Amino acid sequence: MRFMMLMIPKGYESAAPGTMPSAEAVAAMMKYNEALHKAGVLLALDGLQPPSTGARVSFSNGVPKIVDGPFAEAKEVLGGYWMIQVSSREEAIAWACRCPAGDHEIIEIRRVQEVDDFPDDVRAAATGFDDMQAAGRRVPA
């Protein structure tokens, strides 16, 4: 089973462009990331720039509307993520509990929907999804 662990740092929704964690926080997180890697459960991970550098695209009647960050209505935003492959929800939770997160950080754990989870008609509509997914995982040379 694949799970995405989403880091939600309180206060990041209003962080200025270029806001960076401390070297100490990064060093602690690298030890955690290395443990995930050594255990063979880590599939991907990345940190995200603050929302002040992003944009949101919403749609009304098929017409896109673009709003540049920061987003005044945002109460929680993502600061980064890990994609892990483990045998159960409980194992994903156990890994999240080992994270050296700070007092104002939350990790949300969400299981990835696999094509095999869907009924036959939905799987048929998603023909080719596995190929696209595999192509997206390849790292360009």
Image (cartoon, rainbow, N blue to C red):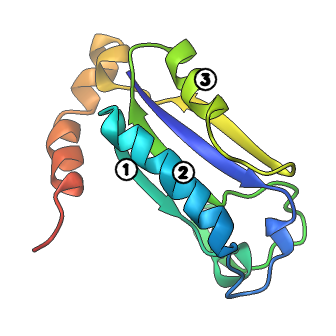
- What is the spatial separation of the Cα atoms under label 1 and label 2, in whole angstroms? 8 Å
Horizontally, residue 126 falls left or right of residue 31, namely: left
Horizontally, residue 6 falls left or right of residue 13, namely: left
Q: Is residue 31 visible?
A: yes
Structural crowding at the residue carrying mark 1, measured as other residues with C-alpha within 10 Å and reported as few (<14), some (14–19) or many (≥20): few
Structural crowding at the residue carrying mark 2, measured as other residues with C-alpha within 10 Å and reported as few (<14), some (14–19) or many (≥20): some
- What is the spatial separation of the Cα atoms under label 3 and label 2, in whole angstroms? 14 Å
Q: Position of residue 7 (x, y in %)?
A: 66, 49
Q: Position of residue 98 (x, y in %)?
A: 62, 34
Q: Is residue 56 visible?
A: no
Which amino acid is tagged 3? Ile
Query: Tag 2 or tag 3, which sits nearer the N-term?
Result: 2
What residue is pinned by disc 1? 44
- What is the spatial separation of the Cα atoms under label 3 and label 1, in whole angstroms? 17 Å
Which residue occupies the extreme left position in the image?
141
Q: Position of residue 93 (x, y in %)?
A: 60, 23
Image quarter for residue 115? top left
At 37% from the left and 15% from the top, the residue drawn is 117
> What number is the disc on residue 93?
3
In the rendered image, the vertical position of residue 54 relative to residue 17, given as above or below: above
What residue is pinned by disc 2? 81
Element assignment for label 3: helix
Depth-wise, is mark 3 or mark 2 nearer the camera? 3
At 15% from the left and 71% from the top, the residue drawn is 140
The quarter in which the N terminus is drawn is top left
Element assignment for label 2: strand
Mark 3 touches mark 2? (CB < 8 Å): no
